[in-house]
Image (cartoon, helix red, strand yellow):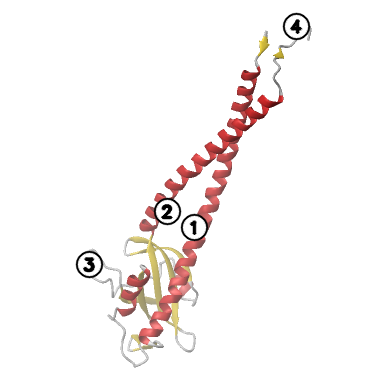
Amino acid sequence: MKISKTKLIAYCGMVSLLASLILGLMGYSHSTKDIENIKNQLLRRHVENNINLTMKYIESFYGTLTLGNGTLLDSKGNSIEGRNEVVDSILEDLGDKSTIFVRVKDDFKRISTNITDDNNQRAIGTYLGTDHNAYETVIKGDLYIGEAEILGDNYYTAYKPIKDQNENVIGLLFVGIPTETLDNIINAHDVKMSKINILIIILRAISLGSLIALVGASVSDKKIPAADKRG
């Protein structure tokens, strides 16, 4: 009995195709982890940049803030409580949720925000809470970046302390993006990219298998005899 060259080449091509698919999918698995890391870095950079921009908005609209009469005062000595020029500009210009807090003893009270409650009312007068994810970091005067819950909704956030000229924490600035919005964007992007990447892997594997088959065909036109019964 003789094994035809065509069958042998086809068999080798299939083995090569499967090997290419396995290697390609393994590489894709690693690449998705890298993509996830990149996304997290981009999110961090986004909120960090935007909270720094928001501080510039505060300086532009209010000047240097000070603490007085239990609230934050602008450079003219007027209270900024209930004034929403900055937070509304942030929502319009950057698309981020934003809140300004005043420090009240060991907590922080919302005095200006573009976040609204179920009745479409601005969520002012409520407190950050000492059990909040960001609290331990910001009370020390440091920037907090990470996920946090705000009035029952989850956000990817940045909280930056507002300090007076003596570096005392007198308030707090928040910017954030709802994680639900982020998840929808990321998931839609991931599904699209997954389909494209897997298609590319399959096409590459098929191309490699075909190339091996063509090379095999050009190397030999002979038929390969089966093994002799004598070994």
Task: Assign the N terminus to one quadrant of the image.
Answer: top right
* Sequence-earlier tag: 2 or 1: 1
Q: Secondary structure at mark 1?
A: helix
Type of the residue with mark 3: Asn
Type of the residue with mark 2: Ile
CB atoms of marks 4 and 2 within 8 Å: no
Q: CA distance from mark 3 to mark 1?
A: 32 Å
Type of the residue with mark 4: Lys
Residue highlighted by disc 3? 120
Q: Nearer the viewer, residue 194 or 108?
A: 194
Q: CA distance from mark 2 to mark 1?
A: 9 Å
Q: Residue 166, how many percent across, how many down? A: 49, 89
Q: Residue 79, how many percent across, how many down? A: 31, 87
Q: Nearer the viewer, mark 4 or mark 2?
A: 4
CB atoms of marks 2 and 1 within 8 Å: yes
Residue highlighted by disc 1? 39
CB atoms of marks 3 and 1 within 8 Å: no
Q: Which disc number belongs to residue 207?
A: none
Which residue sits furthest right?
230
Q: CA distance from mark 2 to mark 3?
A: 28 Å
Q: Secondary structure at mark 4?
A: loop
* Sequence-earlier tag: 4 or 2: 2
* Sequence-earlier tag: 3 or 1: 1
